[in-house]
Image (cartoon, rainbow, N blue to C red):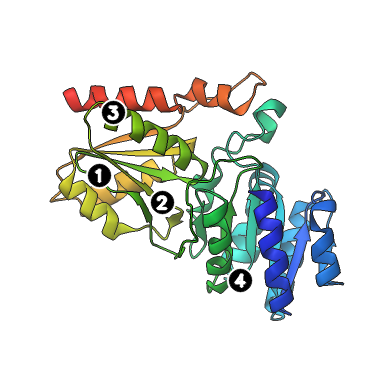
Amino acid sequence: MRNAFAAEITKLAAERDDLVLLSGDIGNRLFDKFKEIAPGRFFNCGVAEAGMIGVAAGMAACGLRPVCYTIASFLTYRVIEQIRLDLGYHHQRVLLVGTGAGLSYASLGATHHSVEDMGMLRLIPGLAVLAPGDAVELRSAISAALDYEGPVYLRIGKKGEPVVHQNPVDFQMGRALRVREGGRVWILALGNMLPVAMQASDILESRGISTGVASMGSLKPLDEALLREVFAGADLVATAEEHSVLGGLGTAAAEWLAREGRGAKARLLTFGTPDEFLHQTTHQLSARAWAGLDAETMAASIERSLQV
């Protein structure tokens, strides 16, 4: 995903004179082409993420469109106060791009895990939270985020993520992308769990269980129209995210059910990381297995839930 981000933001920089890119001590070589296309509009702010947010807020107040890019855990936990006050309170149009989100950096331990980030940031008034499902969604999501009249957190993976969409998509704030139509079950996938959701859907379909998949790339604003449709028509709706079971998509869906779900037929099943730290250094797939975020585990849990 990060290569797709670099390519797309460089293309947009050639079209927009107001686009400025700030980096938190990473991505120097990744953005060599950007620096050629837009000399004087790339700033490596170093290991000073709070300062980077403040600089970006000032740039936005002067009419520029700043994009802040660094590892998701450092972009969020370390500077939540600056995001809340400098960007949220003043409603500054700054795009925050957190790379290596979720368990992408599982090999570097808990300091690099970011599985509470979306839960924190979706609480900030006026701040949108996006998590595209693959590189194709990401390219379209960047333009949508830059057009948003407020701050945006764009959560992406690292590298090598599978591509699900074979053609360009029209990513819109507050709208999910229906990837596969279903009947009895719907899996609502957030971010890089989209390929896993597709695999789980394949398993369930092979067992005679009609299973649709939607990419919920816009966590905030949320596609409430889709929620209304799938909860009214399916027997079970599952959410899947490489994020804590607290605060993310599963929580947002439960909040919607409590508020608007009077006619809901389906039950809600949530998949995410447990409310505990992972104390091992391991690779991403192993970390997902620890959290029950592999396709086989998800499919088996969905099938058991249908039998209750």
Tag 1's secondary structure? loop
Q: Amino acid at mark 2?
A: Met
Q: Is residue 216 left or right of residue 138?
A: left
Q: Amino acid at mark 1?
A: Gly
Tag 4's secondary structure? loop
Q: Nearer the viewer, residue 93 or 58?
A: 93
In percent of width and height, residue 185 lies at 24, 38
Quarter of the picture holding the C terminus: top left
In percent of width and height, residue 287 lies at 56, 24
> In the picture shown, does residue 138 fall above or below 252?
below
* Residue ID at (64%, 58%): 96
Q: What residue did someone put label 1 on? A: 182
In percent of width and height, residue 191 lies at 50, 46
| For discs 3 and 2, the disc positioned in front in the rendered view | 3
Q: Does the rendering let one see residue 117?
A: yes
Q: Quadrant of residue 104?
A: top right
Q: Amino acid at mark 3?
A: Ser
Do the CB atoms of the residues marked 4 and 1 lie less than 8 Å apart? no
Q: What residue did someone put label 2 on? A: 216
Q: Does the rendering let one see residue 277?
A: no
| For discs 3 and 1, the disc positioned in front in the rendered view | 3
| For discs 1 and 2, the disc positioned in front in the rendered view | 1
Q: Nearer the viewer, residue 115 or 175?
A: 175
Tag shown at residue 206: 3
| For discs 4 and 1, the disc positioned in front in the rendered view | 1
